[in-house]
């Protein structure tokens, strides 16, 4: 595209100021800026801005939709905990895995900034005896589950594959790729680990003007975890425009996808119970939830908004609604805490593009460094001066035809890593504590006992969710340690 045509396009969109320094740029800088502006759909950016601002003002108005927010209807949600049902769902899920119908999509675009690390959050070591990263734990759960499915279906070793699609962001992709390569993909076949990148959107001033962070570069930010839908349609690499996550899923004949966030050390990757429940329900999308700890817990809940499934933020629910209890069970009416852990059919993922323009992006008001167009100086604001636009992964819920909810036990499946060490909640210490406490329960449920103060870490390669430990029944463990196989437990008794 000629520079005149490009400039006219931006002039028509009201964003011609991005060419302010054009005549002062070197040829290399001009080429770089032109490439960025050409790749950017500026009319779409303007539409997203208008819709986001309109949505935000609607949400803040006194006549907003709070009156139409209702708890999940009866029958919309089920819980784990009934052994017969859990086993039925587990078998359905394992059968699908054994047939090669299941893929896993990991949202791993975040950096560990709050944790004092610039590395991707999945590289973080929460202080376990093994010093394994979150990435390694999740990879080894996939390996173990492949073995379980092979054994159940009486298939040869290495024949069951759960492909792992790892969504990074611009700042984390290269580091993530290097981390996986330097750790030999944690034992997985590299061709079954597909690393791709979520998109970005320009940072905007409050009036919708796109900001520059250098005279030759537009300021951009990742488009939120909901950017995964568009990212699945985007070429994985610039060398092969036809290879996308969706095309890869189709080539492998994957029917079902489990998607989750990297920062949960207890996540059951490709959880067969969750898969089996969703498949049995014939759902096109399912949310795994945990019960809210208490009425005022600041967590979004899966609920009904305008008679459609939605995630309702805590700030959108009145105190009376938050404290309301079901007269039959005594449980909180709004209890289904959202943990960004979802099931999709690949058919549904392929449909998202058709309604994506209807989704409203969310505005995050931030302090965004920018170039002053008059002085050409970099301004580092002391207070929020603009907005980043984000889509959330749950924004598609209202567009599902068959939606389901599965409630699981928090201590078994959810311990997020959000805060700096020493914070006291959702930090590395609580992640470590919760994972080791679960391993203690694995041992006790297998008929062993563990002395007070003893900490034993069990590799995911030994047990995915407590299975495979039958041989330790009756043993008393008196020493702390880390084991890579069941036999090593003998040394700790």
Image: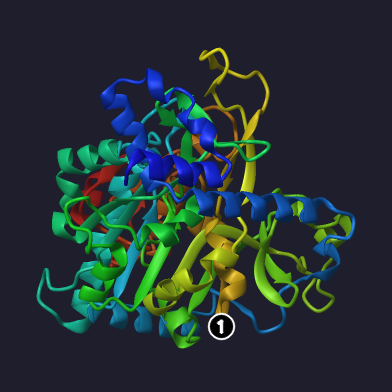
| 108 in relation to 26, above or below | below
**Quadrant position of residue 269:** bottom left
Q: Nearer the viewer, residue 255 or 325?
A: 255
Residue found 47% across the figure and 86% down from its top? 282
Structural crowding at the residue carrying mark 1, measured as other residues with C-alpha within 10 Å and reported as few (<14), some (14–19) or many (≥20): few
| In the image, residue 232 above or below residue 315 | below
- Viewed as shown, does residue 114 lie left or right of 107? right
Q: What percent of the width, then of the height, locates residue 261? A: 45, 52
389 above or below 402? Answer: above
Q: Which residue is mark 1?
A: 401
Q: Could you tell me which residue is drawn at 58 percent across and 49 percent down?
A: 46
Query: Which residue occupies 63% across, 50% down?
Result: 362
Picture coordinates of residue 382 (x, y %)? Answer: 65, 18
Q: Check the image and report above or below for 3 versus 328.
A: above
Q: Secondary structure at mark 1?
A: loop
- Kindly tell me whether residue 102 is visible in this rendering: yes
Residue ID at (51%, 46%): 416
Q: Report the side of 164 relative to 65 (left or right).
A: left
């Amino acid at each position: 595209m000629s520079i005149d045509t490009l400039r006219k396009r931006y002039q028509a969109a009201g964003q011609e100021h991005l060419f302010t320094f054009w005549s002062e740029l070197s040829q290399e800088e001009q080429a770089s800026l032109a490439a960025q502006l050409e790749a950017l759909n500026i009319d779409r950016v303007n539409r997203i801005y208008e819709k986001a601002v309109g949505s935000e003002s609607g949400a803040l108005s006194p006549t907003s939709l709070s009156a139409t927010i209702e708890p999940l209807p009866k029958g919309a949600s089920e819980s784990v905990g009934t052994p017969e049902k859990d086993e039925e769902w587990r078998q359905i899920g394992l059968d699908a895995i054994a047939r090669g119908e299941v893929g896993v999509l990991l949202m791993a675009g975040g950096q560990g900034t709050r944790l004092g690390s610039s590395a991707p959050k999945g590289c973080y070591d929460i202080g376990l005896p093994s010093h394994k990263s979150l990435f390694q734990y999740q990879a080894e759960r996939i390996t173990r589950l492949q073995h379980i499915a092979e054994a159940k279906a009486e298939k040869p070793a290495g024949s069951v594959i759960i492909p792992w699609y790892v969504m990074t962001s611009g700042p984390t992709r290269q580091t993530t790729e290097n981390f996986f390569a330097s750790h030999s993909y944690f034992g997985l076949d590299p061709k079954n680990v597909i690393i791709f990148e979520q998109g970005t959107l320009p940072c905007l001033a409050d009036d919708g003007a796109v900001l520059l962070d250098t005279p030759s570069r537009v300021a951009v930010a990742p488009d939120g975890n909901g950017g995964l839908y568009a990212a699945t349609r985007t070429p994985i690499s610039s060398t092969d425009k036809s290879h996308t996550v969706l095309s890869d899923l189709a080539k492998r004949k994957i029917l079902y996808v489990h998607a989750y966030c990297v920062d949960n050390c207890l996540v059951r990757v490709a959880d067969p119970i969750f898969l089996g429940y969703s498949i049995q329900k014939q759902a096109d999308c399912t949310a795994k939830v945990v019960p809210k700890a208490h009425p005022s817990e600041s967590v979004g809940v899966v609920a009904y908004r305008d008679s459609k499934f939605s995630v309702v933020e805590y700030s959108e629910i009145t105190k009376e609604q938050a404290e309301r209890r079901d007269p039959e069970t005594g449980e909180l009416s709004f209890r289904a805490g959202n943990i960004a852990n979802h099931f999709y059919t690949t058919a549904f993922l392929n449909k998202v593009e058709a309604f994506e323009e209807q989704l409203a992006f969310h505005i995050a008001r931030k302090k965004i460094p920018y170039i002053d167009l008059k002085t050409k100086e970099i301004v580092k604001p002391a207070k929020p001066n603009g907005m980043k636009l984000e889509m959330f992964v749950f924004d598609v819920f209202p567009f599902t035809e068959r939606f389901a909810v599965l409630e699981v036990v928090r201590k078994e499946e959810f311990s997020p890593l959000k805060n700096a060490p020493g914070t006291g909640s959702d930090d590395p210490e609580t992640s470590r504590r919760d994972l080791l406490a679960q391993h203690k329960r694995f041992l006790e449920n297998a008929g062993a006992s563990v002395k007070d103060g003893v900490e034993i870490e069990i590799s995911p390669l030994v047990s995915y969710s407590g299975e495979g430990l039958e041989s330790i029944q009756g043993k008393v463990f008196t020493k702390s340690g880390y084991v890579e196989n069941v036999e090593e437990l003998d040394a700790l008794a």
